[in-house]
Image: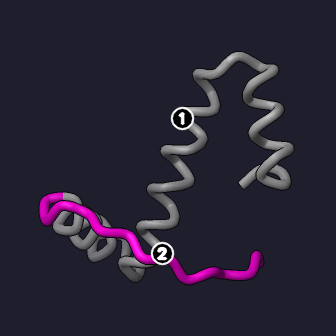
């Protein structure tokens, strides 16, 4: 239940098409799917960073996703 912020993001058409296909399969909006995919990507990147850097980024961002 976090506050949502509007942001513009330009993506290549194949990325848009994949997000749309995933959203349809999951029965959610494109926006919801994009948020889920971005969260998963961020978590994947964080999992590959050294603990100190990961902790610094999490603190700077205000906590976990």
Colouring: one colour
Asked if residue 39 is among those painted magenta in the image, a careful observer would answer: no
* C-alpha distance separating marks 1 and 2: 18 Å
Asked if residue 10 is among those painted magenta in the image, a careful observer would answer: yes
| Number of residues whose C-alpha sits closer than 10 Å to that of mark 1, classed few (under 14), some (14–19) or many (20 or more) | few
Of residues 8 and 24, the one nearer the viewer is 8
At x 71%, y 55%, the residue is: 65
Determine whether, in the image, residue 3 is placed left or right of residue 17: right
Q: Which residue is mark 1?
A: 44
At x 13%, y 59%, the residue is: 14
Q: Which comes before the other along the chain, label 1 or label 2?
A: 2
At x 14%, y 65%, the residue is: 13
Boundaries of the magenta span: 1-14
Relative vertical location of residue 61 with respect to residue 59 in this rendering, above or below: below
Could you say where residue 9 lies in the image, as x and y percent from the top left?
38, 70
Could you say where residue 54 lies in the image, as x and y percent from the top left?
74, 29
């Amino acid at each position: 239940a976090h506050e949502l912020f509007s942001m513009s993001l330009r993506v290549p058409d194949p990325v848009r098409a994949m997000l749309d296909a995933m959203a349809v399969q999951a029965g959610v909006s494109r926006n919801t799917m994009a948020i889920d995919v971005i969260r998963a990507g961020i978590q994947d990147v964080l999992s590959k960073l050294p603990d100190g850097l990961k902790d610094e980024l999490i603190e700077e961002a205000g906590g976990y996703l």
